[in-house]
Amino acid sequence: MSAIRRVDGELWMEGVRLAEVAKRFGTPCYVYSRAAIETEWHAFDRALAGTDHLVCYAVKANSNLAVLGILARLGSGFDIVSGGELARVLAAGGRADRVIFSGVGKSEEEIRAALAAGIRCFNVESEPELERLNSVAGSLGRAAPVSLRVNPDVDARTHPYISTGLKGNKFGIAHDRALAAYDLAASLPHLEVTGIDCHIGSQILDMAPLEEALERVLELAAAVVARGIPIRHVDLGGGLGIRYREEETALDIGRWCATVARRLAGSGFSLVLEPGRAVVGNAGVLLSRVEYLKLDKGKRFAIVDASMSELIRPALYEAWHEIVPLAELGRAAATYDVVGPVCESSDVLGTDRSLAIAPGDGVAILSAGAYGMVMSSNYNSRPRPCEVMVDGARAVEVRPRESVASLYAGESTLD
Ligand code: LLP
């Protein structure tokens, strides 16, 4: 669902005019739509109505407490990758028994906190992690529920930085070592093997690699069960791609869920999915303001007050985000590179964009709900932007803009 629409030249999110949000809260500013988040989460949950399942939202995509709280109220599960994310989920009212813990480098402290909270499952990514989990669980007198993340060696055909399912990748246990790893897990006294999982990459727009991974994981699951190790759930990760530009077609959530449901029918396995981007990506925008229009050697730059510090995706992955004016004011259009104030040539938000803008105008950088604020930094001592949740006709500030003083509050000079 697109969270925004244009009415009489003005951009709206639900019942709120975005120019009003920019004026009230300032720019840069992240704005999210509660209705859009709920709609996308329900798209998964409803499509799986006939299947024993848990949708575990991947917290890394957007971990603002308001986002997590909205999903917790829907009964969502959560996929976390750190103790910090666990704390956020619990603070937002999420249930620990619906949390799964992914990631290649879980520390002893994180494992202890997750065991104490009583999470649903650890997605284990290596043999040494099995040993560590066993020893920490033993020291607490508990059994740790585990699933092994297997690397199905499937090419997700997405950007190499966000592709994780190929051999030679740091993620998961190699396909040909998976059965031995299951034997090891089953032999360790403080582990309880409950599942199998995979995640082959992110922003996947083609269903074929996902289907290929599904088949490989089910084949392995059957082999594990045949060894007398009972697996109860299959977790297929996240990765469903969204539409960033008009010519793209998002991966159809309903179609993917129906495919998986059909394939799992009668298997006795329950299903876990870990979508992040598909739930929040198109539910958020980053509002910014034009500072200057600059002409240099025939090239036009629109210098705006958002930058790679607030949204790093274009700089890091050459990702495309649509950029549109908040109001159509009948100005003449020109082609600009839209750039931020940060002292890096890579501080570009969009190249060759046709925009009808003037200094002082508000713009919205679209599809910024996932991997936007969570990947922001204070580079160039820029305070992080505020975050606003739109809910019907309300716009609620769910995280205030950082102050400059807070950036160095914990620092000190030498005597
Ligand atoms: N599960 C696991 C184990 C993951 O590693 C990820 C994402 C997800 C689920 C959620 O994937 P999603 O449904 O959001 O595609 N920063 C990059 C994306 C990195 C994704 C990392 N893992 C970007 O901005 O495109």
Image (cartoon, helix red, strand yellow):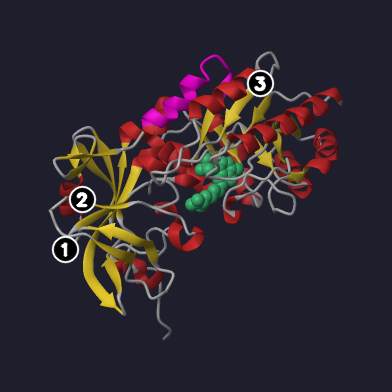
Task: Decide: few, some or many residues near mark 3? Use Cα within 10 Å; few <14, some 14-19, many ≥20.
Answer: some
Residue 135 coordinates in the image, percent (x, y)? 75, 44
Residue at mark 3 to residue at mark 1: CA–CA distance: 54 Å
Question: Where is residue 197, by image quadrant?
Answer: top right
Mark 3 and mark 1 in contact? Answer it, CB < 8 Å.
no
Residue 364 coordinates in the image, percent (x, y)? 27, 52
Disc 2 residue type (three-letter): Leu
Point out the tag, 3 or 1, that comes first from the N-terminus. Answer: 3
Residue at horizontal 60%, vertical 48%?
Answer: 110
Please check the rendered image and state whether residue 224 is part of the magenta-colored stretch, yes or no: no
Find disc 3 in the rendering and name its residue: 263
Magenta stretch in the rendered image: 38-53
Disc 3 residue type (three-letter): Arg
Task: Decide: few, some or many residues near mark 1? Use Cα within 10 Å; few <14, some 14-19, many ≥20.
Answer: few
Disc 1 residue type (three-letter): Gly
Residue at mark 1 to residue at mark 2: CA–CA distance: 11 Å
Point out the tag, 1 or 2, that comes first from the N-terminus. Answer: 2
Residue at horizontal 20%, vertical 46%?
Answer: 18
Residue at mark 2 to residue at mark 3: CA–CA distance: 45 Å
Task: Decide: few, some or many residues near mark 2? Use Cα within 10 Å; few <14, some 14-19, many ≥20.
Answer: many
Find disc 1 in the rendering and name its residue: 360
Find disc 2 in the rendering and name its residue: 326
Report whether 281 appears left or right of 202: left
Q: Main secondary structure of the magenta part?
A: helix
Residue at horizontal 40%, vertical 73%?
Answer: 411
SS assignment at label 3: helix
